[in-house]
Amino acid sequence: MPQPNAGLSHGRRALGKSGLTVAPLAWGMWRFKGTDVKAARTLVETALATGMDLLDTADIYGPDNGEPFGAAEELLGKVLAEAPGLRDRFVLATKGGIQMGTPYNSSADYLTSAVEASLKRMGVERIELWQIHRPDHLAHPAEIARTFEALRASGKVAEFGVSNHTAAQVAALSAHLPFPLVSTQPEFSPLCIDPLYDGVLDQALEKNLAVLAWSPLGGGRIAFPTDDRAHAVVAELTKVAERAGVSVTAAAYGWIMAHPTGAIPIVGVLAGEVPVIGLPRVHEEVADLTVPPELAAALAAVAVEAADAVGAQLVTVSLWRPESADLVRVYSSRPHVYQLGGISAELDDAWIEQCLVGQRSFLAAGEVAFTAETAEHVGVLTVPNLTAAVNAVIVDAEGVLGCLNFLDAAGVYSEVSVEVADVFAARLAPVLRSLAAA
């Protein structure tokens, strides 16, 4: 049973009554995509290197990324085929029961075929945790239970759980099972608190179910708040983060993990994201800066969209100030790390030649290229493996206005990323021009 006040422990967490234990953060693979197996392997290895050893995917992960059904599982299978030694280093969790066009199908035939297809795509013989992704209201729980029994007896699945199920639906399925479910996967974050009141977490305490919290950052709105409620919640989380000396996202994860269920946030993949947790604030000179609310909203809107398109754990926008020959930060996705108003005054010759004179965006990727000449505070940034960067120059007909910066894990970016970043940099030009004139 979870120990009282164990929520914020860094220790391993029990996966229900399975006998398996996992790290306090899991890695979700919704955005695990693409055809570059080497880059995908780097992402998996980086996630494992941070200590995360529960990898949560699903057969439906693919279409939302413009890829076929099963694409994320298939990409993981290619990684495991290239590096089979990785397989013993993590607990494999996947989900099924969503059928394109149906949409939910938990019939015996479909669930069995879904498990077999997942095994084939990933090239594995067994799945440690298989979960019904969404409830099928036309499937009798007794039929689902018999299917689970058969799959377990075959050795294809070790343990079973559910995702997006109500407490009553979990109880109905459990009543027909000769063994316990081990997990439930609700949406749970400081912006989605329904599980605190709808019985899902209470039931998890009662039945000793592991709670796998999906979308722990509220669909990115905690990292990139765009509405009044998100801004209000982030303001409170910021107070906690500053007292603890951690990032706002770390505070959000801690809020989830503090629940006595020992809830496990599923850290989502955004073009290969690995979480920035506990980074210290960068000490720098800060300008007395006021960004008008309408311009701040415009900056945030473009930055959030750009982060989704390019992928970034850290996004900043800086305004070029020719009178003082420096850059001042006017937007930061992680203000606890990179403050608004932060000044970059000591610009190296390479940056001046490439960006200010040549007006060319550039890519820095890998520890060799990612040096003090390509980014400030590299010693801080390399701690969470932020060794890839895109610096997109923001320019209009009158000259350079500033830059849009993206930072993420090694292997995430390519020259195509720079081209995409330039599109968003162009959209920021009129915003920075208005800000310069404000």
Image (cartoon, rainbow, N blue to C red):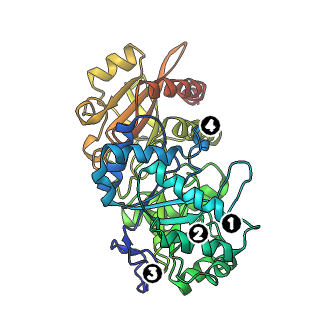
Q: Which residue is mark 1?
A: 135
Say which mark, if any, is on residue 298: 4
Mark 4 and mark 3: span between their CA atoms? 48 Å
First in sequence: mark 1 vs mark 2: 1
Q: Residue at x 31, y 60 (%)?
A: 88
Question: Taking the image as drawn, is residue 185 in sight?
Answer: no
Image point (55%, 28%), residue name: 424
What element does badge 4 sit on?
helix
Q: Is residue 188 left or right of residue 354?
A: right
Q: Is 302 in front, or is 269?
A: 269
Indicate the amino acid at tag 3. Answer: Lys
Q: Nearer the viewer, mark 4 or mark 3?
A: 3
Label 1 close to label 2 by CB (< 8 Å): yes
Mark sitting earlier along the chain (1/3): 3
Measured Cα–Cα span from mark 1 to mark 2: 8 Å
Residue 370 versus residue 38: which sits nearer the camera? 38
Disc 3, SS: loop
Q: In the rendered image, which residue does mark 3 sit on? A: 17
Quadrant position of the C terminus in the picture = top right
Closer to the chain start, of discs 3 and 2, is: 3
| x and y percentages locating residue 213 in the rendered image | 53, 66
Query: How far apart are labels 4 and 2 at the CA level?
Result: 39 Å
C-alpha span from label 1 to label 3: 22 Å
- Give the residue pinned by disc 2: 162
> Judging from the image, what secondary structure is the residue with disc 2 in?
strand
